[in-house]
Structure formats: C-alpha cells, structure tokens
Amino acid sequence: MEDVIKAYEIVKNYAHCTPVLTSKSVNAILKADIYFKCENFQKGGAFKFRGASNAVFSLTADDAKRGVVTHSSGNHAAGLALAASIRGIPSYIVMPENAAAIKKKAVEGYGGKITFCKPTLKDREDTLYQVQMRTGAVFIHAYDNIKVICGQGTASLELLDEYPDLDIVTVPVGGGGLLSGTLTYTKGFNDAIKVYGTEPLNADDAFRSLRDKTIYPSVNPNTIADGLRTSLCELTYTIIAAKCDGILTVTEEGIVEAMRIIWERMKILIEPSSAVPIAAMMEHPQYFAGKKVGTIISGGNVDLGDLPFKK
Amino acid sequence: MEDVIKAYEIVKNYAHCTPVLTSKSVNAILKADIYFKCENFQKGGAFKFRGASNAVFSLTADDAKRGVVTHSSGNHAAGLALAASIRGIPSYIVMPENAAAIKKKAVEGYGGKITFCKPTLKDREDTLYQVQMRTGAVFIHAYDNIKVICGQGTASLELLDEYPDLDIVTVPVGGGGLLSGTLTYTKGFNDAIKVYGTEPLNADDAFRSLRDKTIYPSVNPNTIADGLRTSLCELTYTIIAAKCDGILTVTEEGIVEAMRIIWERMKILIEPSSAVPIAAMMEHPQYFAGKKVGTIISGGNVDLGDLPFKK
C-alpha cells in the first residue's frame, strides 16, 4: 500500500484524476450501487498511462536518457509512448504487424518509434531483444514490473479516497497488472473490501491458474475483450493468489450486452475489457446484489469502424 | 433573460446540472478553446428535458390533472413523458409509425402513452387533435412554446455561470427552441457574446428563412442529424431574426467526421445533431479560430445498431 501511495506522488503530476460516475438506471438494471472510476477519460484513453508514467518518471536521469522499450499491441504501448514523450525521452514500441491501425496511429501520435514483428510470441521477444540491444533502452513490461503495478493501483487510491465505504472493488484481469495494483492498495486500505478479478470465459487462464495453483498461458483466446488476452506472470500471480477474493468469468454475449448498456445509459464509450466487470455483475448477481460496488472502467479505446452492436 | 432565470428556479429541481468538458486534443484539431456543455448526460439523454420540465411544472394543478400531449418522434417525446411521470400526470405522445424502436421504448419506459400516426404532417396534426379532444390534455409543442424555449435556455445559463468569459456560443438549430432559449439568455447576459446557429446544408431552412426574411418549411430533408429536420415557427423565427449573429451550414460528411472526433477523443456518445456545431468549427474556422467557444452538446441518443462510422 505504501508503494502505491509513493507511486501516486509521481502519477498525480501527470495523470488526470478521472471522475467517478454513477447512473440510477444502470443501478436499477444491475441491482447494486455502482461507482464507475472512468479511466476511459484518462490520458491515452486507458489506466495504462498511470503505470507507464510511474515507471518512466521513476527512472534515473542516466537510465531515462537511453529511452524505454516495450512490446504491446494495445493501451500500454500508447501509455508508455505518451509518458516518454512527456519526459522528453525516446520510446521504442514493438508491435505485431497485424495490430489495429488505430493503435499504430495512437503510438505514432505520441512520438513512439514502432518496430513491427510477426504476431508470434517468439518473434515479439526476438524483436524486442534486438531493439533493446540496438538502443540500450530500458524494458518496461506491461505488467511484469512493480513500478507499473503500483502505478495502476493509483486508480483505486483515487476511487477509495472519494468513496471509502465500498463493499466491493472489481476490475478486469488480463496480465494482472491492474488487479495486482488494485489488490495492493485496496486490501491495505481496508481488508474487509472484497476484490474480484473478472475475465472472459474464453480467456479464463487467471481463473484456472488460481484454481490449480499454476500459471497457465493464454493461447490465442477468442474473446472480444482484446485487452485481456494476456496471461499472468509470476509477479502478478503471487499477488493475486495471496489477496484476491475470486475470479469471475463471463460470456462473450454478456460482455457485448454490458457494453451496450453502459454506452446507451451512460453515454460514455467503454472498451470491451471494461465491460467484463459489468457483465460479471449481470452473470453472478449473488456477489453484488444490494452492495456498493466500485469498478474501474479500464479504457475507452475502440475501433468505431468495427463495433459489435447488432441492429 | 429574466424568464430564463425564472425557468431555472423550476428546472434546477428536476434536471441535472450537466458537466462542461474540455479536451486538449480536440482543441488542437479545431484550433479553438472549446467548452462542451454535455446535455447528452441530461435526464432522457438530451436538453429537451429542460424545456419539458419547465412546461410541465408551470401548469396549474387543474391543467396538470388532464395530462400533457405532444407529437414528436424524438427527444422531446421522451423528455415530456419523463417530466410528466415525475409530476405524476399522464402524457400522450403522437409518434409516426416508422419512428425508431429505441425512441418508442424510451417513451414507454417513462410511462408515455403512444398513439401512432402516418408519417405525414397532416396525419400527425389530425391524430394530435383527436387525442387532445379525447383526453383534454394540454398540448406542449416541442419548441413553439415560450415555457419550453425558456427551459432550453437554462443550459446556457449553467454554461455561462461556469464560464462567463466565452467569446462565442454555438448550438444546432432545428425548430429553433434551443437557439431561441440560448439567444434569450446569452444576449441578456452579455450582448458581446456571438451566438451562431448551425444546421445541415441538407436541412438549411433556417439559413434560408433568415436570409429571405420568410419562414421556409423543411420538407423531408435528407440529413443524418435527425433532431434538425423540423422548421422554424413564427415564435422562434422572431427571436432568432432579432438576436442571432448568423446561421452556419455544414456538410453530411462534416457531421460524421465531427461526431467521430468527439467519440474517439472524448470517449462520449453524442448524437449527429450535436456534432453539427463541431462540424461548423471545422468548415467555417474563420469564425472560431483562437476563440473561447461554448457549445451545447444537445444529446446522446443514437441507435447503436445503426452507426455511420466506416472501417
């Protein structure tokens, strides 16, 4: 918890303190009092900027000069490029060549230098290694990095500062960075607050990993929640296994329905990954009914030309 | 202006004081400082609830008992049904049989009693007359009603209360209720603030009416901005002709592009009508460059199954 508070001393200088929204009509549908911490309004459109800015601004001046490097096809890439540009240092991003055009544009817009790789784990790691050798840049992993995890925890710090009496906090889990940061802060703040991770049934590696006490890789999972296709690492697994109250899984249909409810009722754009905790409230109501539930809306980066809503 | 202030004494008890949002990246694209008064977060998803609640709560107890009636296929119908349900009186809504399913659902959700008519002006007016005769309900026109106009003006009251030093206020114009209310308050508040109406080139009846000093009807205009297909009436024409600094027209492509910029950059849902003033800033930059511009985001009611965004 102290580490998250320390991270906040850095992060608060660069990140937005995002609003916490509520909606009577969504509460009526989900039969709970829900507090939406809107990281879709964060810089770069996702909570990832918090972890990235903590990592980037924690570097010594000497390390920072060499720049930062990562592999990511999503929000971490944009968050890191933006944090690096604010510090005035180079960022090198390894992206699969089939990454969405909108994600490439975002990274380039923040001044990130992209190197494309084939969409395989091996080529991604090889390419990263080459870029790192060539540039000497510091590798900032999307979640296997304690500075990143503590940065992500600052979202729940702000949430609980505003609403200290929540019964539950729930977040999506992909690699586990956001969940680990949320657990670290929330359980330190008040151990009685339940914290649930939520993930697609089609990418339920965290659920199975916790159940079987072994880290399963997530192999090409077929889910619309593109931010949650990654697997836990040793670091995030350890934190989650020690502190988490459970992992709840949801269907693809539930994710799209939850996303539609939030868009229609609250008039805000949330990405599929952010709809996963909402879908969990629909599909596992026994955990949430009548409770005060905080949920972190992880981001709002969607491709408007490729939405899942039917007529 | 005093009438809008009086309306606010009523409206503020029922309507949300909506947030005013800003976006550095949108400002950079449009080269102006823009203050978005977000009526998409208003009850019923649009500013229309302001005018409707002022009209409904201004009725005497005897009049109110008979209920209210209107014809509308859009946001006024939902706003009026909601205001009536809050006062505990019946509302009767005449809607064309081809109205969007989502609009019917919204009106029914607020307890409005729908009577369908053929989608012609004549059948709409005939059906309204029949419902009025049968029920004795009070007709609350969507904009040809001074209480409604003053209610709509309360959006600019809140905006200028928060940002009194705007150079320009710009709103979309359909029937002219929002523009008339905005002019009434804004010009009273500070005559030096420019107020522009904005409308689709494909529905430029207000532009032509002002230019030729005669009210042109809007005949089946082909525009995506479904809230702006109506024509001025004598009342709104008179206010607009006396006070407005100009009507700016925009292309359909501009409306979709502006809508996409706001969705992507600000992560909020705005309906096509609300994108019209943003499109005007893109297509007529000479009026806005470097200025502090307030714009009223009129609403966020869109059919997610029928969006205009291309791959």
Image (cartoon, coloured by chain):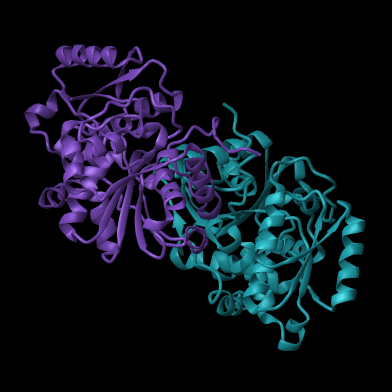
Chain colours: A cyan, B purple
Number of numbered discs on residues: 0
Q: Is residue A183 visible?
A: no
The picture quadrant where one finds residue A275 is: top right
Q: Nearer the viewer, residue B113 or A86?
A: A86
| Relative height, residue A210 to residue A307 (above, below) | below
| Relative height, residue A8 to residue B274 (above, below) | below
Task: Report whether B295 appears left or right of A5.
Answer: left
Q: Is residue B259 visible?
A: yes
At horizontal 26% and vertical 28% (from top left) the residue drawn is B216
The picture quadrant where one finds residue A150 is: bottom right
Q: Nearer the viewer, residue B236 or B307?
A: B236
The x and y percentages for residue B271 are: 44, 40
- Quadrant of the image for the C terminus of chain A? top right
| Relative height, residue B156 to residue B96 (above, below) | below
Task: Report whether A249 appears left or right of A144.
Answer: left
Task: Report whether B11 appears left or right of B104.
Answer: left
The x and y percentages for residue B86 are: 24, 36
At horizontal 71% and vertical 87% (from top left) the residue drawn is A61
The x and y percentages for residue B68 are: 19, 26
The x and y percentages for residue A192 are: 55, 62
At horizontal 57% and vertical 75% (from top left) the residue drawn is A8
Task: Report whether A236 appears left or right of B232.
Answer: right
- Quadrant of the image for the N terminus of chain A? bottom right
Q: Nearer the viewer, residue B284 or B220?
A: B284
Q: Nearer the viewer, residue B48 or B171?
A: B171
| Relative height, residue A67 to residue A270 (above, below) | below
